[in-house]
Image (cartoon, rainbow, N blue to C red):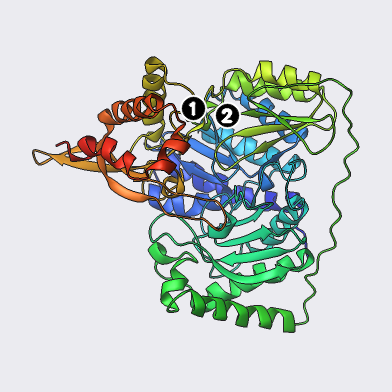
Amino acid sequence: MKTIDCQTWKQDLQDFKEKTEAFYAGELDKMAYKGFSGYYGSYAQKGGKASMLRLRMTAGRVTKEKMAFTARSIREHTINRIHFTTCQTIQLHDLTKETVFDIMEKALDCGIVTMGGGGDFPRNVMCSPLTGVEKGEYFDVLPYAEAASDYLMNFLKAEKMPRKLKVCFSNSPANVPHATYRDLGFAAREDGTFDVYGAGGLGNNPKFGVKVAESVAPEKILYYIKAMWLTFRAYGNYENRGKARTRYMQDALGGAENFAKAFQEKLYEVLESGENLDLSVSEPSRTKNGDGSVAAGRRVIEQKQDGLYTVSWHPLGGQPSASTFCALSDLMQTMDGVEMRLAPDETAYIINLTGNEAKKILEVTSDGAASLFETSVSCIGASICQVGVRDSQALLASCIKAVREAKLPDGALPQIHISGCPSSCGTHQTGAIGFRGGVKMIDKKPNSAFVLYVNGQSLQGKETMGRELGTILETKIPSFLVELGKTVAESNMTFEEWNAKDAKAIDRVAAPYVKES
């Protein structure tokens, strides 16, 4: 297997610089630039006056070295808008073209590749964030996620790729990275092997993945990745961008069973080709031990390693302040064996801490979510994103403000998921409560609104798409959530308990808001 050196990507940077200069000079229109710049992990923001850059963090793993580089870039360029994405990357926003050039090039020296962060390419490989340290996991899937990422970089310039190719690895049925409904997902089994799912995804025409293989030896995963590419080349609709995703193959081939058969045929071709894609992977050695100090609290998680802890930190809206991010990085540099892991719900986990170290991390990250509801998920929103319909970040901020003022007890509301458009970057379709940006006509005039989804589920074996209840005016959503939270609180149950008792109770609370016109 060929592994690509990060430094080889520097050869492509001059083309990016020239096209970006042309775009900001008004010589290249926004759609032409968008089609070009996505390869480099960068897009122009709405209005065309600034850029964003997506730093790929394979499997959501942010080492101390990558933290330090990111913090240094934030300080040097006075970056004030940072976003932890639902694909486990770090986005830097409001950048000048000079800043994008500088960070993109220097990131390669730190092992951070931005190429393929957007566009028609394999995206950041995702992974259960606490794999390797989580109690109860089937096995550590991180080495396989990292090997898959290295292999997929060979496909950045391959022909006839899907519009996105999202690959992920799950360490347990918690299914945190949604392995059962990605383009290609590897779900760990208790026996140390993987079940493999393909052709899934959220957004338009959402589909749960098709199980294409069971009990796959971990060293064989790359054969399945190549088979997916060959399957899409043979059956994917790469001529229609709206349907150039693997999940459309389920319909094109006449159903899940036919897709699985087509995939198996391509897998057979790969296995019979003679190409050696076997992996030889060793679990990373972990030598850090606890020192006898202890830590406890809502954000503290005991690791499977005795005496070591993880601290969770969820910046509101997945947007950490620059000062907190940099202070956290500085603190992490003083600690051995510590790193950050990004989760698909925009939470960050700082792992491998002694009890005393955990207390220090808790203090520096005290500005994050203070309740389950405040860990809610939001895409970057229409104020930044060119294709966004509604400002999901503004909606979340107004909802958090209203819920705080109402002084609702923790647990009265669940984590909600907000997407500014149908793309489902906020994973609204499989959240307990989800909102998708839309419009509501009142007196023949369009009003800012969101479509409400309820009772989505992501647990492996229980996956469910949320039911669409209707459209609510954006201005009324905070009131709806406060009323819902008060109703739940009066029952002396958590939202999860209340909702499980009567899954249609939420419909009754939402009805007046959905019908309002």
Residue at x 69%, y 22% (from the top left corner): 328
Determine the CA span between mark 1 and mark 2. Answer: 8 Å
What residue do we see at 71% from left, 25% from top?
A: 329
Query: What is the secondary structure assignment of the residue under circle 1?
Result: helix
Tell me if label 1 and label 2 are in contact, CB under 8 Å: yes
Say the numbered circle drawn on residue 314.
Answer: 2
Q: Can residue 95 be seen in this view?
A: no
The amino acid on which the numbered mark 1 sits, given as a three-letter code, is: Glu
Q: In this view, does 502 lie above or below 165?
A: above
- Disc assigned to residue 374: 1
Residue 214 in sight from this viewpoint: yes
Q: Dividing the image into 4 quarters, which one contains the C terminus?
A: top left
Image position, residue 461 (x, y; %): 55, 58
Residue 62 in the figure: left or right of residue 480: right
Quadrant location of residue 443? top left
What residue is rendered at 69% in x and 39% in y? 107
